[in-house]
């Protein structure tokens, strides 16, 4: 009997501690309180969420002077919501690059998708940085964004034509992990380009960024549009108007 009582007490305590740790309370005034909030115990009328991020993604906000581990989540969520407001689109969820499993090694040969793409697109035999031939060092690559030739792999990055973040904000957030991984490693959405050019593009779409090589711009737009259609992603209305005008200009 004593053993049974002890077991029941332990189970009850474990469940109670788990619930306390997991429950996030969104007050009637829209403030998200986790157990690090000074107002957590005093908040009696609330909507329950499993995580602080989930609460914030509904439009909730952190308490004033909150200093718990959720500060980073709060900053990211609020920044994402502000970006959505400025872009004139609905906020869906905070973008997490790690949710899109990229540069995978599908065949287990130690060369991930980045290095296999460098090997396949080089116009000359490549050299490697290591004995196992996992990491490409040199080759000969044409970059259509800059209309230049490069021979050092360290000068290059792999651009997602439709960036992961851009896709996330236009429908990809709802995809299962398998589709996110497929998208992140799809050769039809990857291009070898010079590093600083890729950085200047960042996660922008065609309405905000086009390759500096002007003669490639219409081809780039066609590739971008193709990937959007392939994955059934949706432009924002303002973006669609701008892109339609660009496509008309390309067809003239």
Image (cartoon, grey):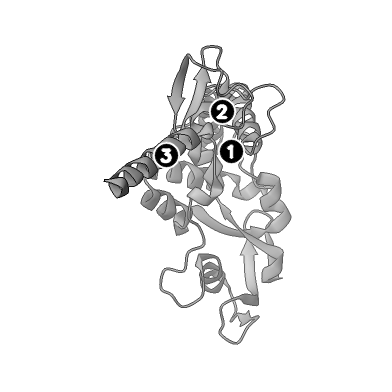
Q: Element under label 3?
A: helix
Q: Using the image as rendered, state which of residue 80 and residue 135 is in the foreground.
A: 80
Total marks placed: 3
Relative side of 156 to 250, left or right: right
Q: Residue 236: percent from the left, percent from the top?
A: 50, 27
The residue tagged 2 is 242
| Residue 180 in sight here | yes
Q: Using the image as rendered, state which of residue 165 and residue 146 is in the foreground.
A: 165
Q: Quadrant of residue 118?
A: bottom right
Quick one: quadrant of the N terminus? top left
Relative side of 168 to 64, left or right: left
Residue under the image location 70 percent in, 68 percent down: 154
Q: Using the image as rendered, state which of residue 151 and residue 232 is in the foreground.
A: 232
Residue under the image location 40 percent in, 54 percent down: 182
Which mark lies nearer to you, 2 or 3? 3
Q: Are marks 1 and 2 in contact (CB under 8 Å)?
A: yes
Q: Residue 146: percent from the left, percent from the top?
A: 69, 55
Q: Which mark is residue 13?
A: 3
Relative side of 243 to 79, left or right: left
Position of residue 93 relative to residue 241, above or below, is below
Relative side of 96 to 229, left or right: right
N-term mark: 2 or 3 = 3
N-term mark: 3 or 1 = 3
Which mark lies nearer to you, 3 or 1? 3
Q: Which mark is residue 206?
A: 1
Disc 1 to disc 2, how far (Cα)?
9 Å
Position of residue 63 relative to residue 251, above or below, is above
Q: Are marks 3 and 1 in contact (CB under 8 Å)?
A: no
Disc 3 to disc 1, how far (Cα)?
55 Å
Position of residue 126 relative to residue 229, above or below, is below
Q: Quadrant of residue 188?
A: bottom left
């Amino acid at each position: 009997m004593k053993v049974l009582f002890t077991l029941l007490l332990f189970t009850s305590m474990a469940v109670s501690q788990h619930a306390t740790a997991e429950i996030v309370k969104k007050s009637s005034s829209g403030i998200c309180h986790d157990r690090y909030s000074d107002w957590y115990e005093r908040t009696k009328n609330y909507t329950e969420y499993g995580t602080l991020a989930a609460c914030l993604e509904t439009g909730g906000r952190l308490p004033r002077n909150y200093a718990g581990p959720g500060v980073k989540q709060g900053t990211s969520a609020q920044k994402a919501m502000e970006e959505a407001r400025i872009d004139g689109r609905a906020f869906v969820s905070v973008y997490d690059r790690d949710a899109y499993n990229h540069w995978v090694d599908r065949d287990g040969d130690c060369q991930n998708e980045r290095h296999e793409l460098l090997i396949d697109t080089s116009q000359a035999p490549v050299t490697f940085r290591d004995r196992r031939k996992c990491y490409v060092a040199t080759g000969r690559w044409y970059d259509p964004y800059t209309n230049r030739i490069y021979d050092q792999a360290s000068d290059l990055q792999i651009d997602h034509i439709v960036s992961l973040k851009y896709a996330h904000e236009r429908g990809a957030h709802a995809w299962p992990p398998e589709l996110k991984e497929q998208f992140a490693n799809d050769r039809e959405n990857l291009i070898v380009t010079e590093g600083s050019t890729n950085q200047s593009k960042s996660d922008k779409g065609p309405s905000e960024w086009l390759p500096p090589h002007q003669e490639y711009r219409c081809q780039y737009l066609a590739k971008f549009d193709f990937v959007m259609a392939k994955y059934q992603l949706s432009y924002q209305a303002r973006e669609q108007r701008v892109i339609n005008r660009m496509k008309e200009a390309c067809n003239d």
